[in-house]
Amino acid sequence: MSIQEVKTVSLNGLEHIKSDNKVIEGSRIDLEPLSEKYLSKEYVSWLNDSEVCRYNSHGSSVYTLEQAKTYIQQSKSSESLIVFAISTRSNHQHIGNISLRISWQNRSGEIAIIIGNKEFWGKSIGAEAYRLIIELGFNRLDLHRLWSGMASDNRAMVRIMEKLGFIREGRSREALFKDGRYLDIENWGVINQKQPVSSLPVEVLDRKKPDYGKPFYLEKLRYCVRCCMPETNEGIKFDEMGICQACQSQEQKIHIDWVAREKQLKQILERYKSKSGNNYDCIVPISGGKDSAFQLHVIIKRYGLKPLAVTFSHNWFSETGKYNLWNILEKLNVDHIMFTPNRELVNKLAAASLYKIGDSCWHCHSGVGTFPLQVAVKFNIPLIVWGESVAESSGRACYFEPMKFGAESLFLKISAKVTPDEMTGNHITPKDVYPFQNPSKEEIEKVGVLGIHLGDYIFWDDERQMEFVRKEYGWKEDEVEGTYKRYKSVECIMPGVHDYSKFVKRGFGRGTDHASQDVRAGLVTREEGFELAKYYDSKRPEMLDYYLKITGFTEEEFFKIVKSHREGKAKELP
Ligand SMILES: [Zn+2]
């Protein structure tokens, strides 16, 4: 289905699917909106069959053709219910129904299924039908949650739930009276996280494990009491309750007057636009990631500015990253400048970087901060618009004081820490690192550079933004090593190595970062977060082989160098 189609379907909700009588094609079954053509004695007989109805509310009184007719009419005209006939692909035999009852306000949908034709039991037809409905619910109707209730004795359904990554959410005791006894009803749900949580190895979320829900270094490190962040995170601050700065920021975020903030943003943008004359209104530094697409969309479509897009290429672009970068530039018709350091230099810096900062990526930390600044000075464009707020995931800032910066490069101080001059030696010359030198303070002041983060002025929601750019611009996700999120750093091939070094150095990686964000957003529990973190943080990235190849390090050397960068409590790690 094309993006435009997805959008239309999503906007018009169910109407579109119903009116077109669109068939959803599976591998062995088709789903078609239930209509009179499916009305048959056989269909009615399912609902009078005690075996078929063993676990549902039917079967206690006789179900009639008339009732079936009414049900079909109701489902056809309902704005919140859609029922599909399940038919075999091979000979279009009607074998059951599956329904989705939607609460639009909560973006939640209840799925119920009946396989009436018993010949098709035990053949995973139910699981396939569920998969098709999940696809419909999450990807086309943009629902947030799907759930099903079922008798706890219904082993076949429980197996489907487990297989599809639903989580058992709770149990209503003796809620179904059936054949003279009370049965418990279990509720199972799945959240649309756009993350392959359902494809995790089963043991990851196995609650019966003795260490389930516990952090990796329980004995050695102190963790935020709200998220999964350990004390070894750089710049982390806990309040007297033991809650970290990022968790506090998340709370601040909710109490901020975002309408007022957006007004401030408009004022800033208008001020610079009115001064820009025929020049560009601002610089938007982009990597090709999700934020890039969203920043450009906001600046161009919402505020009508003409930006110059600027990319520092780490020269480690993934195929998906290249696609996303060129795609968004095309779709939004943006002028673009990219700087790419040569391969040999990247390899040399990647090795030196491990010695100097304990991870592979100095040239990128440094370049993404410096290059936009150089362009600002050279092209005389004073305003630089970054994406996510520094407060979002770090303790270095808080939402109450939006971080604006001018004469000094924030990134150099924070991420790269080591200056270009300090990177020289060992076959790296001052000429090599020249592209990483910041403009002088005087040059920056002369242009009057101001850097702002959109996330300080408009409510930042990674998940929603990703869904948006995916739908609106065909932005693509992919697997990213070191995390379960498929959109963070998808533009680069090296995040796995970077984050694995962090894990070795500080006892946590990006699994922890992302799980903590999701815990704060209420998408997973803290216990689930720790399980995700443990699984992804400690997994050796495949790209480590490539890194060792380009740097000439052995794996032992890699560990030794990284461990030499441990500080504070991390020194006690094994
Ligand atoms: Zn926290």
Image (spheres, rainbow, N blue to C red):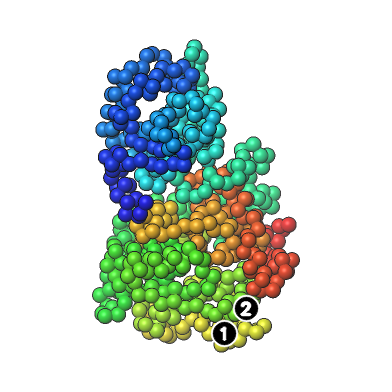
Residue at image x 51%, y 20%?
183
Which of these two is toward me, 208 or 399? 208
Q: Position of residue 39 (x, y in %)?
A: 32, 25
Q: Quadrant of residue 275?
A: bottom left
- Is residue 421 toward the left or the right of residue 443 in the image? right
* Residue 226 percent location from the top left of the image: 54, 47
Residue at the limit of the structure toward the top, as seen here: 180
User: Total label count?
Assistant: 2
The residue drawn where x is 30% and y is 58% is 260
Residue 417 vs residue 423, the one in the foreground: 423
Tell me, yes or no, whether the two marked residues, 1 and 2, touch with CB atoms within 8 Å: yes
On screen, residue 394 above or below 338: above
Q: Residue at x 29, y 49 (%)?
A: 8
The percent coordinates of residue 363 (x first, y second) are 55, 75
Residue 469 pos. (x, y %): 38, 58
Q: Quadrant of residue 568?
A: bottom right
Front-most of residues 317 and 416: 317
Residue type beneath disc 2: Lys
Q: Name which residue lies at 62% across and 64% down.
A: 543
Residue located beneath label 2 in the image: 348
Quarter holding residue 356: bottom right
Q: Is residue 423 visible?
A: yes
* Quadrant the C terminus occupies: bottom right
Q: Amino acid at mark 1?
A: Asp
The disc label shown at residue 432, or none: 1
